[in-house]
Image (cartoon, helix red, strand yellow):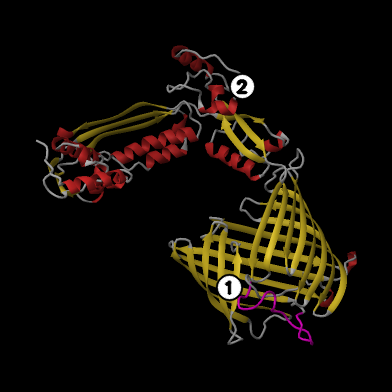
Amino acid sequence: MGRQRKWPLANKVACCMVLPLLTLSPSTWALNAAISGVSGQVERNIDAYLQNIDEEQYTDVRLEGEIRQRTQEAMRVFGYYSPDITVELDQTPIAVRIEPGPQVKIEVLSINVEGEAQDDPPFQEALDNFPLREGDVLRHAPWDRLRNQFSGLAIERGYFDWGFTDRRMEVRPYLESARLYMDFNSGPRYQFGDTSIRGSHIDPERLRQMQTFEPGDPYLAESLALYNQRLGETEWFSSVTVRPRLATTQELIIAPPSGGDPWWNEATSAQPERPRLSSAALASALSMSRREENNTRLPIDVSVEPANRHQYEVGIGYATDVGPRLRFGWKQPWINRFGHSLNHDLYISAPEQRFTGVYNIPLEDPLRDSYRLQYGLRNRDDGDTRSMEGTVEVARRWEFENRWVQTLYFRTTYEDFTQGGMSDQVWLFYPGIQWSRTRTRPPRFPLWGDRQQLSIEYSDTIWGSDAQFARLTGDTEWIRTIGDDNRFLARLSVGAIETDDFDKLPPSLRFFAGGDRSVRGYSYESLSPRNEEGRLRGGQQMLTSTLEYQRRVTGDWWGAAFVDSGDAFDNWGPEELKTGAGVGVRWVSPVGPIRLDVAHPFDHEDDWRLHFSIGPEF
């Protein structure tokens, strides 16, 4: 007999008004039940099984049966096949009392891998890591996980004819025992075949040079994914699809049971339709065709669409170092069939205006090896510095497996400048070499990352340069996070120039410190040696460092405390580095991190400086 519920009229009206809203929230369907007799994972699993029961939709008899059935299902995965379950509906919350009874133990465990996968290390590793043994309590999760692991490995590693010849779980609750059988036959492992490229405006041979596999290599889905990623990183294409043409070696396969075409047809739409056979003819044909040497070679279909030939970008920002700033970018990711690219950038702020262009010539590996021609004009008018500079640079770039980038370049610069009241015009010709590496994750607001850079440059009057010098710069920056809410940043920058005629060096090569990304508490590039008139002249050496601790306040808001120290000077070992410290706020906005800092310079007791900037630390 069902439970009788008596509702006063007011309650009925309220119920009619509220019930439609409750149906919008599945969490309100959770059955309010008190579970006793079990604990830990078993209790939590039962609770999860009972979560979406809406008791209003059941009579008492059906509700009790539903609770009992779901409880039994939840317990079986832990080997409890004969629990004694008592459900008391007249209590609030509903009482579910359980006598779990004995757990079923594994009497027979037989797992076999046949076919070429039996010698494939990942399959053997899966078997070795399987946690169940004969005599152990039966648990369903590892068994199901192994089954899914075998099928996943088969697809990832090219065993496309895989199947389970036997997969059974025989449970005898009355004997408290279970027999588990799993026979997996992988069949042959397929190999990569030839690559077919459609839709490319870039020389197809150039794309093949970027392949992460060779025809005849064992198939590996990871290699295809990496090839797909590398093609996308070239920025030559708006879309990239890399797929194995399964229909080539399995083109006799009958259409999927659900109807329609196989998923790979999208990548092979240009291929002609092939006749399909009955299942009996299919088995015979495949059996005979597998004897052919190339039967297990999978052709790879690459389908691409060209990226827009002209791309434009406009950026507006503000920083206390330079005030409002405007940037306009014109990017041509490809200008010919060889993948050459051309980028132009215009930057405008009150103290500085510059125009730069980069012509990139990719080599055999476009992502790692290239020649670059860079040119630009820059005008600076900031305090004691006035300069008009023109530069042309030719560079050769290599990126290594460990993500270090080596750049060898030759630069020529003409600069008409006035620094600290002294004016000059110089032509400089100098080679240089740079090593750098940047690693971040995630890129927008890194919780882990580091950046390293070391550059060495040399100029000599022997080849017509107006000044002889050797110049070295180095930077290292680290970001690490402890837990989810504690972020640490450390930075160190050094620089040194060895020259007999420092006055011939333009401001672009001298060292200055101070500002948002240097020693906070001091204005932009305000730290350097001064001449007799008290004007900044720039330093031959430079050293700056930063230590910063950030703590998440809530969501994307962080608080920060920092100390910066450094200076630019003429001789190593300055008597006293300039030091500033302060606190700040970080907001990870949709347009990038926004930083607001208040810093106090230690050598000016009553001075405070506000620093504001947008963009990541790296």
- The percent coordinates of residue 348 (x first, y second) are 73, 63
In the picture, measured across the screen, residue 391 lies left or right of residue 247, that is right
Residue under circle 2?
271
Viewer-closest of 278 and 596: 596
In the picture, measured across the screen, residue 480 lies left or right of residue 377, that is left
The magenta-colored residue range is 518-536
Q: Amino acid at mark 1?
A: Thr
Quadrant of image for the C terminus = bottom right
Residue 476 sits above or below residue 383 on the image: above
Residue under circle 1?
546
- The percent coordinates of residue 206 (x first, y second) are 71, 38
Q: Quadrant of residue 389?
A: bottom right
CA separation in Å, label 1 and label 2:
60 Å
Q: Residue at x 84, y 74 (%)?
A: 504
**Residue 80 visible from this viewpoint:** no
Q: Residue at x 50, y 34 (%)?
A: 157
Instruction: Indicate the secondary structure of the residue bearing disc 2.
Output: loop
Q: Quadrant of residue 566?
A: bottom right
Residue 538 sits above or below residue 396 on the image: below
Instruction: Indicate the secondary structure of the residue bearing disc 1.
Output: strand
As for residue 524 lying within the magenta part, the answer is yes
Pointer 1 or 2: first along the chain: 2
